[in-house]
Image (cartoon, grey):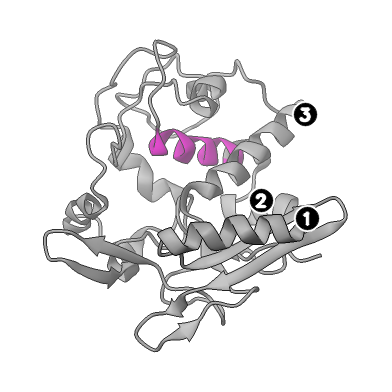
């Protein structure tokens, strides 16, 4: 099995410029793993097996798992309307939006980064003209960018990938658990699972052996670090996790 996986990986990397850590495991442990590329391209510092990486919307898994945990504990249900849970003024957010709608991306609420409209990562820079990147720290900061936007469609009408929906789920977690989002995730997901190199960090305060993020600007034909592109500590892009070790 190890040789077969290695063969597939080496064939793929000949055709693709891969930078990161590739790892395949089964119930008995690691079958094959390999680190490639640089965690810091300017200094040519290589990635290692335990390098930590930004996982971007991978944090949605933590959010969804936390919501499901609260549901299992009978503190929340899929049919609960967020308007009945949150004390904040939701303004233009449809009052019939439920936890289920948010989890399944069927809420139809407006999105501060609408990925259905544009896939250009640098479009987020437009937000920073009025919403400086260093202030994206708490979920309450996101809410004014969401609750003023008109709905895109009625709840349950269709699927529409939504970052804003998971911000609202984070606020639901805070309201129900009486704990801040980062603290709840840490106490109920990260620590119990033994994820010792996983956490929420600002982009200017990363732990050692952490890979910098990079984005390619096609208009300028250049690769840039995402210091002023990725958000700081929050729901979307601030959790860093290395490949799990056995």
Residue 195 position (above or below residue 203): above
Q: Which mark is residue 184?
A: 2
| 10 Å crowding of disc 2: few (<14), some (14-19), many (20+) | some
Q: Earlier in the sequence, mark 2 or mark 3?
A: 3
Residue linked to disc 3: 72
- Up-down relation of residue 194 to residue 139 (above or below): below
Q: Position of residue 169 (x, y in %)?
A: 53, 35
Query: Residue at the spot x=67%, y=66% of the render?
Result: 33
Report the disc number at residue 193.
1
Pointers 2 and 3 in contact (CB under 8 A)? no
The residues tagged by marks 1 and 3 sit, at their Cα atoms, a distance apart of: 18 Å
What mark, if any, has residue 132 been given in the picture? none
Disc 2 vs disc 1: Cβ atoms closer than 8 Å?
Answer: no
The earlier-in-sequence mark between 2 and 1 is 2
The percent position of residue 192, horizontal first and vertical second, equals 80, 55
- Looking at the magenta stretch, what is its main secondary structure? helix
Number of labelled discs?
3
Nearest the viewer among 45 and 144 is 45
- Magenta extent: 162-174
């Amino acid at each position: 099995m190890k040789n077969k996986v290695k063969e597939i990986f080496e064939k793929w990397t000949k055709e693709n410029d891969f930078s990161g850590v590739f790892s395949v495991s089964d119930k008995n442990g690691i079958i094959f793993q390999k680190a490639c590329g640089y965690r810091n391209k300017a200094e040519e510092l290589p990635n290692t097996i335990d390098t930590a990486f930004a996982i971007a919307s991978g944090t949605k898994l933590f959010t969804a798992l936390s919501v499901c945990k609260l549901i299992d504990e009978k503190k929340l249900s899929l049919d609960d309307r967020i308007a009945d849970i949150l004390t904040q003024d939701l303004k233009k957010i449809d009052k019939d939006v439920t936890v289920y709608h948010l989890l399944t991306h069927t809420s139809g609420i407006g999105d501060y980064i609408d990925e259905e409209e544009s896939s250009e990562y640098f479009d987020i820079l437009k937000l920073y003209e009025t919403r400086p990147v260093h202030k994206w720290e708490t979920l309450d900061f996101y809410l004014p960018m969401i609750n003023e936007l008109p709905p895109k469609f009625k709840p349950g009408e269709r699927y529409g990938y939504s970052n804003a929906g998971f911000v609202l789920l984070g606020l639901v977690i805070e309201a129900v658990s009486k704990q801040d989002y980062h603290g709840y995730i840490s106490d109920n997901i990260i620590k119990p699972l033994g994820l010792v190199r996983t956490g929420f960090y600002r982009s200017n305060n990363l732990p050692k052996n952490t890979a910098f993020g990079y984005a390619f600007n096609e208009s300028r034909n250049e690769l840039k670090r995402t210091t002023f592109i990725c958000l700081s500590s929050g729901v979307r892009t601030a959790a860093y996790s290395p490949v799990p070790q056995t």
